[in-house]
Image (cartoon, coloured by chain):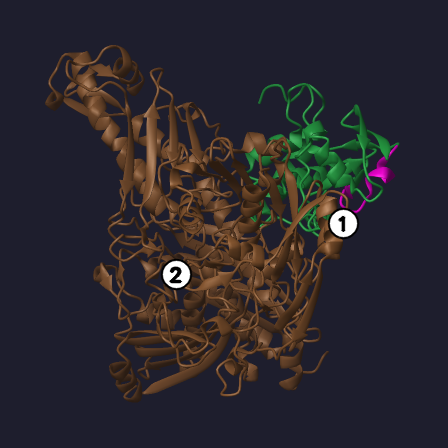
Chain colours: A brown, B green
Amino acid sequence: MSVESSNLEPKGVQGLGKAIKRKEDPRFIVGKGNYLDDINLPGMLYMALVHSPYAHAKILSIDTSQALKIPGVKAVITSKELAGAGLAWIPTLAGDKQMVLADGKVLFQHQEVAAVYAETRQAAADGAAQVQVEYEPLPVVVDPFQATAENAPVLREDIQGKMSGAHGPRRHNNHIWNWGVGSKDETEKALVHSEVRIKQHMVYPRSHPAPLEPCGCIGDMNKATGRLTVYMTTQAPHAIRTVLSLVTSIPENNIRVISPDIGGGFGNKVPVYPGYVCAIVGSIVLGAPVKWVETRTENLTTTGFARDYHMDIEIGATKDGKVTAMKVYTLADHGAFDAAADPSKYPAGLFSICTGAYDFQKAYAEVDAVYTNKAPGGIAYRCSFRVTEASYLIERSMDVLAHQLKMDPAELRLKNFIQPSQFPYPSALGWTYDSGDYEKTLKVALDKIGYAELRREQAEKRARGELMGIGISTFTEIVGAGPSKDFDILGIKMFDGAEIRVHPSGSAIVRAGTRHQGQGHETTWAQIVSEELGLDVDKIIVEEGDTDTAPYGLGTYASRSTPTAGGAMVLGARRIREKAKKIAAHLLEVGEADLEWTDKKFMVKGVPSRSVTMNEVAFAAYTNLPPGLEPGLETTYYYDPPNLTFPHGAYICVVDIDRGTGQVSVRRFVAIDDCGTIINPMIVEGQIHGGLTEGFAIAFMQEIAFDEQGNHLASNFTDYLLPTSLETPRWETGHTVTPSPHHPIGAKGVGESPTVGSPAAFVNAVVDALAHLGVRHIDMPITREKVWKVLRQAGVDSF
Amino acid sequence: MEITLNINGSVKKLSVEPRTLLVHAIRDAGLTGTHIGCDSSSCGVCTVVLDGKTAVKSCTMFAVQAEGHTITTIEGMAQGGKLHPLQQAFYDHHGLQCGYCTPGMILSAHVLLEHNPNPSEEEIRFGLSGNLCRCTGYQNIVRAVQQAAQMLQQPVGSAADD
């Protein structure tokens, strides 16, 4: 979609579908955002962490005496001090536990070993440099396939011999869990009887969300009141409050979590990190506020990584290209602690969406998770819990199958799509897809990019020895976690809340349990309320991120805000409208049944001249009520969605490859998204631009890699590459609209679709360009060097 | 050490260590619109303008090196209560999402337009390639800079009504 109307001022009644400018922008463009590091409290101390240079080592001694001599250093803590407070280890979201500071050994390079508190950030850094730690290096496990070898060193000695974990039996000391879904026997039988079968191994490499603002925390324990205020870069402030209360035993009413403006999250700011805990402990012990803001190196080396799935897929099909069955086996590298941020019942997240947009009758998926000497994580990097891995797997595999069948990849997809008449569609792996029109979306994309003409051009170029490829990805997502019957995190159900208070003068404050990090909630929530109540959008203020004021909710990640809190916002507003109707009837001196809500006001049926606006009703709610009615006009609504939502899209990428250098140039990229009802098309388009850019980065440049000693090879932005404006392609966007049948306004969520859907389109395009040379697959990131090697191996001349 | 910095036209006396980075000095002076993102001069969120004509990543300079220079930060861009055309254009074109890169991006664009008032798309993309953005994919940022270039080229007063 081209958003030509994006100059709409956010004024007046502006409901769904309006590309109004963002209400949050005025403070950001003048430098008046309020991010965590912008907050300074009186008497505040600064914290710095000491990190391990080794990936696996025993700690023989820690000497803090020199550090304590640095002027301004107030204290140094290690695991020993934390143990005194019962905080040497904390529970992870995945049912494992993790060290806060190294307890006897370190399990990954850069692991946190000690925390230093000082009056200035310089003194804290100087102090950290003076903490002397003696290590005895141990053998290292880097390759997940070696983790469960018979002679592999035991990494987690704390659970050595304990052969059962939070997700069932463990078959080796470095094994975490095994998870499977679907019918293995029936799938294998169907595969055996399939006319055509493909097998492919592919790796979704380890990456990191790397938001530009690093993670940080200010712990502020007020000993006079007993209240702990925690400022934290968190996407889920309420969940953090509950977890903090559980691990510190401070009553939850005495904890206030404030998540200020967040400079990008992308899943990185969901978990609890050791730095947060140490800042809070420091404040409790020292009686002063303590600030910790991580360095970029700390961010890339210690906080939540994503992906690291090593996948083997087998697909069966008929000779004419109808898929029959799929079987997937995945080895998941979880690092030193299982700190994956998934709903509790789903250790491999929503990976079982791996049958995608296709009508597979039989499927089986299995995942084994293992420990290695790497940082913990497994967070959903702009992704709904492993959906990115699943979508890449199926979309890449459909191209492998098309290649095997010598079929056009678009034709193969069209032949296997779940049809609109099949919804609600029960998938072979247990989901009920709410709605979708995959064929329509793909046809819009094929038409927009001029697919047939591109294929002709490709044939001509191929005949001349030039390399051009076209890659398609027709993914479906599964977002909006989620319905409380299945979805919880540590037992807390994954509903979300909205509070709406209409003031006497017809303005309103709206709060939600979600926490935006750039997604534009201050605008879109206001648009929803403006639509439902007929209030001016500029008179609605949206507030998120303060647990003392916002209703409970599990936060913003996994494209869940619109499906959950957005639903709460709609139904809360409608509840207010029900009460408003009683007041309107009183004002117009008619019965409620005589009124209708038309053109965003209450009108006497058939008498357009007799109406009242919500502004008039709001004033009456405080000044002129019908007898017996409770004053005021406000509500809090908790929305438990009945199902997940299934946004989808069709992406097509065209690449040209330099046969001499291996350089891949993305010539065009068309993205047609279907996220159901669109609230603000300008914001939706912006989300897609950004997500495609992150998908591009994952496909071509980003990787958190390690050497064989477990040394981290991507610890800063010169080694961990992010695309700049120069290499980022120009995105061509568009949309179809297939509303969700169960969401109150039919919206599905969009933030992660482009990151989920695009990597396969990029890789498919590159492989398509090289397919005639016998190339069937290349793992991401597709660097120039990799392509160069493939070309040389295929015997292609440089010139 | 005591130093005097001219930031956004106001003279500030600051006490710094010799190793204090300019970005920390600016932020400690209360101007928190200049951000920190990478510590390695890669991301550009700490970009400020030196002497009205050079975009500098303020994590690459010591505060003491800035003595005697004028510094413009994002807080100095709006004049007389009116947004700078670049600020207006970023707002108009959805050129920001989380807002963290925005101050540095606007200041880099400002210096680009000072040197090249009518840049091509390629020139804009090259000019901003020292500033990372994780949210927007740069497309709307480029459009915003194009709009600002047009606004800045209009004679003063002609933009009063459209």
Above or below A153: residue A711: above
The image's mark for residue B143 is none
- Residue at coordinates 27% horizontally, 52% vertically from top-left? A484
Kindly indicate the quadrant of the structure image that contains residue A205.
bottom right
Residue B66 is one of the magenta-drawn residues: yes
Rendered location of residue A584, percent (x, y): 20, 17
Would you say residue B41 is visible in this rendering?
no
Q: Secondary structure at mark 1?
A: loop
Q: Which residues are magenta?
A: B56-67
- Point out residue A594 in the picture as x, y percentages from the top left corner: 12, 21
Expressed as whole percent of the image width and height from the top left, the position of residue A431 reads: 27, 63
Q: Residue at x 30, y 89 (%)?
A: A192
Front residue of this view, candidates A683 and A327: A327
In this figure, which residue is indicated by the disc labeled 1? A69
Q: Is residue A52 visible?
A: yes
Q: Residue type at mark 2?
A: Leu
Task: Find residue A100 and report its horizontal and vertical position in percent.
Answer: 54, 58
Q: Residues within 10 Å of mark 1 (few under 14, many from 20)?
A: few
Identity of the residue drawn at 29% across and 33% down: A636
Amino acid type, label 1: Lys
Disc 1 vs disc 2: which is toward the camera? 1
Camera-nearest residue between A448 and A231 = A231
In the rendered image, which residue does mark 2 sit on?
A442
Mark 1 or mark 2, earlier in chain: 1
> Is residue A491 found inside the magenta-colored segment of the image?
no
- How far separated are the C-alphas under marks 1 and 2? 67 Å
Q: In this figure, what is the number of numbered marks?
A: 2
Do callouts 1 and 2 mark residues in contact (Cβ within 8 Å)? no
Q: Is residue A566 above or below residue A705?
A: above
* Residue located 63% across and 35% down the image: B147
